């Protein structure tokens, strides 16, 4: 992926033009039969104070893992009592001795790609995968779909297409691209959780990148209404001067995306955040070199947060085979020493949380036949596996399950201001997962729910099995989607 040939706002791709998108919406509405009014939901007569009760010796509350009984009514946690209290529910679930009830995870970095590239991924398959991995809320990225979510009509189209397909709750990011500065407030007011930009070519022409001065201009506007900018931080100039990644040698691909490209771009984001007073977030940190300056920025009081991803915490460059394009992602998986520094960054709080960066494509785009890293699409599909992957590595380091869930549920929920997600606490949505931490399984790509059966983890044994997932107190059965669309400030 090379930098864009032009960032002229007048050359934003035709596919994103609002008039064109409005025509798509009108056509979709014409071609979709009007839905008949839904019949009243038949609910069993309440014979107990609660719709659903969980009882178990291992319940992960805000006080840690303890024995509790949890009462759920109308999708909300309304009672937390000592084990043995005897809460009565229309449905009662007694956890097995090896099961822990945990808050559902919140994944703020998922590329669903629908509409436009639904052969890569779609709402149904992505959210099934999420549910199978204990993820109960996802926020969809604004690019790889066509159109990109860079104006109000594009968000309206995406919501229309997603309706009735999601198995977990679903929110949307907006996109910040050259020329759409005046569209951002409309997206913000329509419920977008914030805005994503790139500082180099995004990989798709319809989502061009911002130059650093443009980033600063956009941040000043976003700061005026307290919106969050999330940034793919790699410097286009550094990538231009790096070696080309052509061929099947992973070391050559790694050299084409040097740490310095990340470090330079992150330095730009830090200083532009400082100058504007905006809220910013660094996506998918892979360079541990950037940790000291990020820690310094936080110490200075900047409103900047950082995520990393399961693949940077579990994989290492030294073990990636030549031709192994299933491992290709941008920024890349780096060396083992770098990986260990990322873990330290999580432990000391420099890195705030973990998100999947679930970024699938078709098998053909991964160039599996030739294994050419210069040709293959960069992205790893892991939304179903993230909890087990991180837990497998965390327990080797004597890191608690409570800490893992904080990194993957409460911290991301807090950053995007999801006020009823990410915790097992009174008043929160009953988004819950039954997790067998000591169970294990071998990853089989063909059995994963995401659309294209490819993962770099195929054949690996990992710890921790999600046995059941509940979204607002309702068991995900993988047959009937009951996910709800979320808006910023309303969840």
Image (cartoon, rainbow, N blue to C red):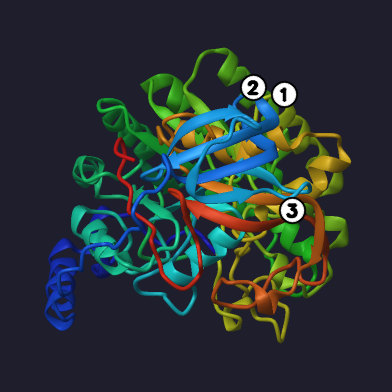
**From the viewer's perspective, is the residue at label 3 or at label 2 nearer?**
3
Q: Is residue 351 above or below residue 183?
A: above
Q: Is mark 1 on a helix, strand or loop?
A: loop
Q: Where is residue 7 in the image (x, y as percent from the top left)?
A: 35, 54
Residue under circle 1?
348
N-terminal of the pair, mark 1 or mark 2, is 2
Q: Which mark is residue 389?
A: 3
Q: Label 1 neighbourhood size at 10 Å, few (<14), some (14-19), many (20+)? A: few
Q: Do the residues labelled 1 and 2 touch (CB within 8 Å)?
A: yes
Q: What element carries label 3?
A: helix
Residue in the image at 45% along x and 57% along y: 168
Instruction: Inspect this view and state whether residue 12 appears.
Output: no
Q: Residue furthest bottom?
A: 369
Q: Where on the picture, by quarter, is residue 194? A: top left
What distance separates the C-alpha of mark 1 from that of mark 3?
20 Å
Residue in the image at 59% along x and 58% along y: 383
Of the 4 image quadrants, the one containing the C terminus is top left
**From the viewer's perspective, is the residue at label 1 or at label 2 nearer?**
1
Q: Where on the picture, by quarter, is residue 482? A: bottom left
Q: Where on the picture, by quarter, is residue 39? A: bottom left
Residue under circle 2?
295
Residue in the image at 77% along x and 34% along y: 400
């Amino acid at each position: 992926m090379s930098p864009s040939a032009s960032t002229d706002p007048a050359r934003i791709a035709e596919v994103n033009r609002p008039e064109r998108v409005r025509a798509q919406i009108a056509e979709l509405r014409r071609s979709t039969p009007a839905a008949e009014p839904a019949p009243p939901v038949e609910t069993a007569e309440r014979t107990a104070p609660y719709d659903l009760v969980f009882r178990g010796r291992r319940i992960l509350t805000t006080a840690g893992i303890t024995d509790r009984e949890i009462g759920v009514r109308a999708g909300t946690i309304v009672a937390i009592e000592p084990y043995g209290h005897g809460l009565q529910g229309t449905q009662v679930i007694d956890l097995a001795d090896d099961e822990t009830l945990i808050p559902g995870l919140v994944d703020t970095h998922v590329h669903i790609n629908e509409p436009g590239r639904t052969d890569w991924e779609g709402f149904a398959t992505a959210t099934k995968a999420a549910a199978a991995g204990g993820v109960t809320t996802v926020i969809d990225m604004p690019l790889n779909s066509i159109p990109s979510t860079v104006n109000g009509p594009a968000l309206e189209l995406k919501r229309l297409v997603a309706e009735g397909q999601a198995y977990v709750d679903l929110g949307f990011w907006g996109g910040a691209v050259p020329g759409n500065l005046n569209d951002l407030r409309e997206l913000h007011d329509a419920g977008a959780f914030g805005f994503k930009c790139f500082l180099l070519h995004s990989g798709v022409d319809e989502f061009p990148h911002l130059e650093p001065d443009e980033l600063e201009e956009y941040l000043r506007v976003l700061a005026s209404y307290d919106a969050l900018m999330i940034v793919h931080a790699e410097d286009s100039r550094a990538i231009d001067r790096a070696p080309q990644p052509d061929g099947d040698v992973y070391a050559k691909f790694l050299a084409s995306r040097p740490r310095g490209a990340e470090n330079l771009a992150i330095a730009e984001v830090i200083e532009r955040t400082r100058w504007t007073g905006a809220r910013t977030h660094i996506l998918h940190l892979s360079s541990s070199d950037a940790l000291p300056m990020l820690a310094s920025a936080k110490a200075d009081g900047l409103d900047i947060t950082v995520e990393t991803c399961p693949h940077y915490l579990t994989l290492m460059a030294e073990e990636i085979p030549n031709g192994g394009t299933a491992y290709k992602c941008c920024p890349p998986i780096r060396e083992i020493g770098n990986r260990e520094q990322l873990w330290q960054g999580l432990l000391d709080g420099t890195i705030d949380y973990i998100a999947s960066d679930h970024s699938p494509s078709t098998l053909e785009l991964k160039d599996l036949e030739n294994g050419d890293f210069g040709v293959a699409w960069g992205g790893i599909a892991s939304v179903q596996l993230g909890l087990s992957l991180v837990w497998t590595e965390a327990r080797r380091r004597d890191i608690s399950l409570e800490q893992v869930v904080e990194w993957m549920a409460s911290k991301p929920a807090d950053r995007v201001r999801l006020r009823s997600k990410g915790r097992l606490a009174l008043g929160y949505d009953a988004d819950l997962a039954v997790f067998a931490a000591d169970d294990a399984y071998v990853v089989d790509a063909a059995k994963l729910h995401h659309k294209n059966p490819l993962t770099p983890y195929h054949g690996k044994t990992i710890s921790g099995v999600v046995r059941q997932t509940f979204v607002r107190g309702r068991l995900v059965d993988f047959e009937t989607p009951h996910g709800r669309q979320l808006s910023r400030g309303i969840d």
